[in-house]
Image (cartoon, grey):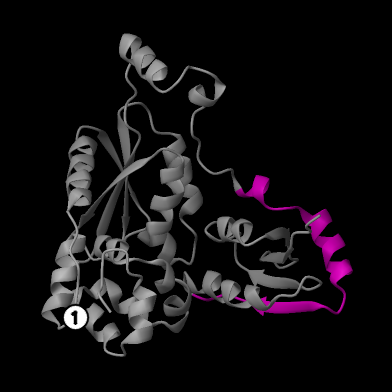
Amino acid sequence: MKITRDTKIGKLLETDERMPDVLVSLSPAFKKLTNPLLRKHVAPRVSIKDAARIGGMTPNEFLRRLEEAGYEVEYSPEDEAARTDAECKQAARYRIQTFDARPYLDAGKDPFPAIQEKLRGLASGEALEVVLDFAPLPLIEIFGKAGFHHCLRHEPDGTVHTLFFKPEQPRGFWRRLRRRWRGGSGQAQRAEKTLPASPETQVLGPGVFESKLQEAGDQLRRLDVRGLEMPQPMMRILEVLPSLQDHEALLVEHERIPQYLLPELAERGFSIAARTAPDGHIQLLIFKKKTR
């Protein structure tokens, strides 16, 4: 098999039992692929291009290392590397606010709401630097859809600094010219991309929870993910969903509303309702959306 920048890591893991050791030799960042849940649910979605970004190298450098290990590869122009360099040079002109998300994860808390709130509070000319021990690909994807650009910087100690910023918009004549070039200045062109809605607008409330719980009756599956390190709660939930029947519901005992899970559920055709249990933890009820 010829490996390209678009080849999925999951495919490599399936076809070559040596691949986990090879990947770890490329970067310590890939040690997490020894987790069976991550290998099953994350690796199939990550391409060589994505993996190179996680490992702090260019796609061609990643491919070259695989070629040295005896694999057949096909190189591509490094246009993405040039774009990444340009993004980082642009981000360097911004005033940087730094947010270290590691203490949140160490305490078992989801840093997503705090990061989202800080992004909402950025003034013109400001960028947010998020510090983690890994490249936050889900954040990059989610915030990218809201118009944020990013720049990744890998430190020798394994720390990853991700800068999120919105390019400054041209003003006056040049802004009007760009609108005209793009085909007018109607509502669609003027609409600003926004961050994802807050959890309370994406998750159905206790009333729906109770109704759906009664409707499910004895066709209810249960899953307790409290106490698990991220991202294992999300992985365990995603592992159950494919086998969930139309008449069934999944009751999840959780410590919080899982932000990263919400777009996955919507994409797979599931709805989610939540309520707070008497002891303060969160109960989630996941069920298939009815199709007409």
Q: Position of residue 82 (x, y in %)?
A: 17, 46
Badge 1 element: loop
* Label 1 Cα crowd, 10 Å radius (few <14 / some 14-19 / many 20+): few
Task: Looking at the picture, tell me which residue is in the foreground, 104 or 167.
Answer: 167
Q: Position of residue 267 (x, y in %)?
A: 59, 57
**Residue at image point 35% right, 82% down:** 13
For the record, the magenta segment spans 199-228
The amino acid type, in three-letter code, at marker 1 is Tyr
Q: Relative to 264, is 288 on the left or the right? A: right
For the N terminus, which image quadrant?
Answer: bottom left
Q: Position of residue 270 (x, y in %)?
A: 68, 61
Q: Hey, which quadrant is residue 269 in on the image?
A: bottom right
Q: Hey, which quadrant is residue 15 in on the image?
A: bottom left
Q: Relative to 77, is 102 on the left or the right? A: right
**Residue at image point 43% right, 41% down:** 118
Kindly identify which residue carries mark 1.
71
Based on the picture, tell me whether residue 255 belongs to the magenta stretch: no
Q: Residue furthest top?
A: 173
Q: Residue furthest bottom?
A: 17
Would you say residue 49 is visible in this rendering?
yes
**Residue at image point 49% right, 62% down:** 109
Task: Looking at the picture, tell me which residue is in the foreground, 289 or 272.
Answer: 289
Based on the picture, tell me whether residue 224 belongs to the magenta stretch: yes
**Residue at image point 23% right, 66% down:** 55
Q: Relative to 66, is 141 on the left or the right? A: right
Task: Looking at the picture, tell me which residue is in the foreground, 56 or 134.
Answer: 56
Q: Position of residue 127 (x, y in %)?
A: 31, 37
